[in-house]
Each structure stands twice: as C-alpha cells, then as structure tokens.
Image (cartoon, rainbow, N blue to C red):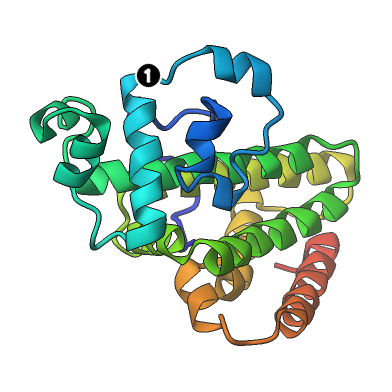
Amino acid sequence: MPRSRPGAQPRDEPHPTDAPFSPGPAAGLASSGFASTGLASTGLGARSRAAPLSADARLLAIAADHLRRLGHRQVTVVGVAAEAGMTHANVYRYFPSKTALVDAVAGRWLREVEAELGAIADAPDPADDKLERLLLALASMQREVLARDPHLFAVHRDATVESRPIARRHRGRLRQLVERVIEEGMNAGTFSLRDRERGIAFIFDTSHRFLHPVSIQLDAEVPRDLIEARLGAIIRAMLRILRLGTL
C-alpha cells in the first residue's frame, strides 16, 4: 500500500464489478479460485444455488480459476471466453482488457479485505485498540493470500506498483477507515493530535514497510512470528506518539 497524499481521495468511477462481494453458486465458486481466498465461505448456500450467475460474474469466476491455476501472464481473454461459451469480443463488453478482467478478480478479494477492516473500525472498542487491530489484520490478510494464492497476490502487487484504478480505490478506502478511527480517538481524547492529516500520514509512513505488497513479497521467507513482532513494535511506538501528540 503506497503512500498517499494527505486528503487525497480516489477519483475513479467504481467499476461495475468493484462492488461488495456477492457470491454465486457454491459449486461455481469452488472451481473459480475464489474459494482459495476465503470468498466461498459466506454461508449463502441454498439461496445462492437457486440463482444463476450473471454473465460478468461467470466470467470473473472463470478468470479467477484460470488466474489461480495459470498465473496472470498466462490468463487470456480468448481462454476465458472459450470456457464461458462466448466469443472474446463478447467478453470485452464487460471488461475492456485482460488487465481489467484480472483486476476485477483482485478487486473482489480487496472488497472482502475492506469489509473485514470495516468491521474492526465499527467495533465498540477504544480507537487505539482498533487502529492496532486494523493494521495487524491488513498485514496478515495480505500475507495469507500471498501464501495461499500467489497469482492473485501478484495482480494486487502489480496494480499497486502501477497505481491502477483498483489499487487507487483500495488505497482511498483504507485511508477512509484510518481517518474514521483517528477522528474517533481525537474526539475521545485517546489521541492528542493537533493536525489530523499529519497523524494519518504518520500512520501510513510508519507502517508502509509492513503493508505494501512489494515489501510483503520480499519478506515472504521471513518467519511469520518475527514479522508480527517487528510490526507490533512499530505499532506500539506509533500509538505512543499518537497518544502524546508529539508529531
């Protein structure tokens, strides 16, 4: 997650597929690659089995399966179209390019990540506790998908490095969640900040080493308990500064 200019919000219009994840039939998800990232375990079995997948959702399920098995460089619009029983020109009605298609697959996972982080931000806990849990969860979920579905992680990594729309939207949503927690902490007196924007920038600058997907990939071979201990130490120092307001 690269640094963002304080106050900046994503300007991109939401993609039709960049919406909260709504699973289709359990069987379709199990073969799509979404299951490997935890997106199939939603508990909507009977209702989902009764509803057929829409064309774009079916294309995403097929693309996710191809991405998981082949890697993003080997995914082709022609191959996805052939499995869907349509022409590749028809796929372009829903996704203007292969990059847009694989980004939409990654976008479904990112929305799941954002939903989990949103639940932390909404919890009735002190702001400093929520901020710690939010940062730890974001780092953990990225490491888990790197281990479980490295090709999906590679799309997320490349989209972040290239600042593609899916990554900019994700970065903006993360900033909104952190901003909510910071404002709550300031209102409750937990954080003694004179400048909210400086506080938000400080959080992202300090945690960047542990949250950016390139750094996470570089540390893939480092033992998880060591990474968690290092990040925990950074968060404790960060919270101490936020409480004292010494920025």
Mark 1 secondary-structure assignment = loop
For residue 15, say whether it is visible.
Answer: no
Q: Nearer the viewer, residue 106 or 177?
A: 106
Left or right: 67 as drawn, with respect to 82: right
Percent across and percent down for residue 35 are 57, 45
Asked if residue 11 is positioned above or below residue 213 in the image, the reply reads: above
Q: Quadrant of the C terminus?
A: bottom right
State the residue at coordinates (87%, 54%).
Answer: 129
Circle 1 packing at 10 Å, graded few (<14), some (14-19), many (20+), is few
Percent across and percent down for residue 146 are 53, 67
Percent across and percent down for residue 240 are 84, 69
Residue 49 picture quarter: top right
State the residue at coordinates (48%, 46%).
Answer: 170
Q: Nearer the viewer, residue 235 or 41?
A: 41
Query: How many marks can you see?
Result: 1
Left or right: 143 as drawn, with respect to 13: right
Left or right: 5 as drawn, with respect to 221: left
State the residue at coordinates (76%, 70%).
Answer: 235
Q: Amino acid at mark 1?
A: Ser
Percent across and percent down for residue 87 are 11, 30
State the residue at coordinates (78%, 62%).
Answer: 242
Q: Nearer the viewer, residue 203 or 46?
A: 46
Asked if residue 59 is positioned above or below residue 146 in the image, the reply reads: above
Q: Nearer the viewer, residue 32 or 17?
A: 32
Query: What residue sits right under mark 1 in the picture?
Result: 54
For residue 109, say whether it is visible.
Answer: yes
Asked if residue 5 is positioned above or below residue 82 in the image, the reply reads: below
